[in-house]
Structure formats: C-alpha cells, structure tokens
Image (cartoon, helix red, strand yellow):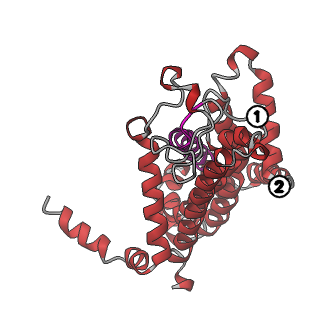
C-alpha cells in the first residue's frame, strides 16, 4: 500500500494524464464510452425488458412510438418494434454483442499482427518477404470485401445447423483476420529500427535468445503505436460488424447486434416506424464517434512532436 499511493500520484501527474484532463473532447468521449460499456455489461439488469423472452412480449404493445410522441407509452421510452420488443432494451442487449465482437476481434488482430510484425522485422529474409507480400495483397482490397470473403469461407466450412450458433465466432475471426495487417506493418517498421540499437547488440553478446530479445526488449518499445491502432480499430471493428450484420451475413435475428437491429428496422422505415432504425443507428454512430475521438487524442498524446 505504501508503494501504491506514490505510483498513483505519479500517474496523475504524468504527461498523458495531464493531456487527457486538459482535453474536453477526450474527457467527454471517455465518459460516453464508459457509460455505453457499463450499459452493455449490465444490460440484463438495467434493461426494462428482456427483448428475447417471448413471455415478456405483448403484441398489443407493438409499433408504439417513443414516449414523447403522441400515442407513446412511458413504459417504452424509445418505442417498440413490430414484435412489441422495447427498442431501448434491444439497443442495450445489441450493444453487448457489438462491443464483444469489437473487443475480441481487435485482440485477435493485435496479437496476430504484433507477433507476425516482430518475426518479420527481427528475422528478416524470406520470413519478412512472405509476410509483407501477404499484407500487400490484403491491403489491395477494401477491408469489408476481405471480411466478406473470410466470412463466406468460414460459413461454408460449417454445417448449416451450426451456422447460427457459430455466428459470433465467425464474425470475430472474419474481422480479426482482416485487420492484423496494420499492426504487423507498424510493429515490423519499429522492430527494424530497434534491432539495430546498441542494447539489442548487448543482449545478443550476453547470449540472450531471439525470442527473449523480442519479448523482453523490443516488444515493450513498440507497444505505443499498437495501443493507438487498437483504439481506433475498435470503432472500425464495431462498424464492420454492423455492416456485415446489415448485409445479412452477421448476427442472426435471435442474437441481434446493433447492425442487425438497423437491418431489421430498415425494412419498416418507409412504413412510418422510423424509431426502430433511427435509435439503433444513433447508438452505433455515437459509439464509433466516441472511440475515434478518443483514439485521435491518444495518437496525439503519445506523439511528442504534437505536444
């Protein structure tokens, strides 16, 4: 405990913390993200209704407008859809799936990209050449097309009876295997710079193995850019998941994410039930915007040239 307080004070007085406290955009974005994360985590307890429990649905309450619109009900603040599901509760539960896919795919992409970037930058030669040519091929196509291709291959390899249950894992793999290139190229460039420095030569002279050098000496020095990329990619991963679900190759209607809710609501947009699509779309936009703004601040805060 005696060592904790000095560490806490040192963190509070650090350059990054000071930059965060002085940036209103970063503070507001962080608060919005924190509120959305907590809402998603505790959705089963906070949501007024379990939209996936048929016993809680009353078809007489279907297609109710938001509470402030004539004909609305205070029991359903954002209205209900055609199946009498509370839109607010659906957004809370859908956000859980979107954030889970986003975080899991970012972790997968980061681990894969950092590992391959370290190997390519440190070993060089044929390993580096093969990895970078694969990266060049992936970068020559739009990420959404690559995700669609991987998604189709993974779905085709599964029996039709298991596709709905495996949709979450398929989405995570599709997005994660699409976004590893940015991490790999960034880490590779930083590794090629670090491996020529004197402390690496000293470690080699002392007989330190290649794996130990990469993990103990090089990896800690290349994690700064990786953290920035991961923050920004979280928003892109959530948006990619929503796009795939909107196209009908993402989460099934029985496990709706924000993208699935938008796709379902879009079918009834021109019949006057605008709230079914507008509110999930607004939640998705706010989530992605907050992540991107926080990522922009983090990029500037970790760049000494921009301080």
Indicate the position of residue 85 as horizontal and vertical percent values: 56, 33
Q: Does 66 appear above or below 287?
A: above
Residue 91: within the magenta?
Answer: yes
Q: Is residue 113 visible?
A: no
Main SS, magenta residues? helix
Q: Give the magenta range.
A: 84-111
Q: Which residue is mark 1?
A: 249
Q: Residue furthest front?
A: 70
Q: Which residue is mark 2?
A: 136
Q: In the rendered view, does 245 fall on the left or right side of 102?
A: right
Residues at marks 2 and 1 touching, judged by CB atoms closer than 8 Å: no
Indicate the position of residue 161 as horizontal and vertical percent values: 71, 14
Label total for image: 2
Residue 249: within the magenta?
Answer: no
Q: Residue at image x 68%, y 17%?
A: 162
Indicate the position of residue 76 as horizontal and vertical percent values: 49, 42
Q: In the rendered view, does 101 fall on the left or right side of 6?
A: right
Camera-side mark, 2 or 1 = 1
Circle 2 — which element? Answer: helix
Mark 2, residues whose alpha carbon is within 10 Å: few (<14), some, or many (≥20)?
Answer: few
């Amino acid at each position: 405990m005696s060592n904790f307080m000095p560490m806490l004070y040192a963190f509070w007085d650090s350059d990054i913390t000071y930059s965060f406290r002085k940036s209103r955009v970063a503070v507001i974005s962080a608060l919005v993200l924190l509120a959305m994360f907590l809402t998603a985590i505790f959705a089963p307890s906070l949501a007024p209704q379990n939209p996936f429990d048929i016993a809680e649905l009353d078809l007489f309450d279907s297609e109710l407008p938001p509470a402030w619109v004539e004909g609305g009900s205070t029991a359903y603040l954002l209205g209900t859809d055609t199946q009498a599901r509370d839109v607010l509760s659906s957004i809370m539960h859908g956000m859980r799936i979107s954030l889970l896919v986003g975080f899991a795919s970012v972790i997968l992409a980061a681990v894969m990209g950092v590992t391959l970037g370290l190997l390519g930058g440190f070993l060089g030669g044929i390993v580096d050449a093969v990895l970078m040519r694969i990266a060049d091929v992936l970068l020559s196509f739009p990420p959404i097309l690559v995700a669609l291709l991987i998604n189709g291959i993974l779905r085709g390899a599964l029996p039709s009876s298991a596709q709905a249950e495996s949709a979450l894992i398929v989405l995570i793999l599709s997005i994660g295997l699409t976004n590893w290139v940015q991490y790999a190229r960034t880490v590779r460039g930083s590794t090629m710079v670090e491996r020529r420095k004197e402390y690496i030569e000293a470690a080699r002279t002392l007989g330190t193995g290649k794996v130990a050098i990469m993990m103990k000496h090089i990896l800690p020095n290349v994690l700064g850019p990786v953290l920035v990329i991961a923050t920004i990619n979280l928003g892109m991963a959530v948006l990619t998941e929503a796009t795939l679900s909107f196209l009908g190759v993402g989460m099934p209607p029985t496990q709706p994410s924000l993208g699935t809710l938008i796709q379902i609501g879009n079918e009834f947009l021109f019949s006057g039930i605008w709230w079914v699509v507008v509110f999930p779309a607004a939640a998705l936009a706010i989530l992605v915007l907050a992540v991107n703004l926080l990522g922009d601040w983090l990029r500037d805060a970790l760049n000494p040239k921009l301080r």
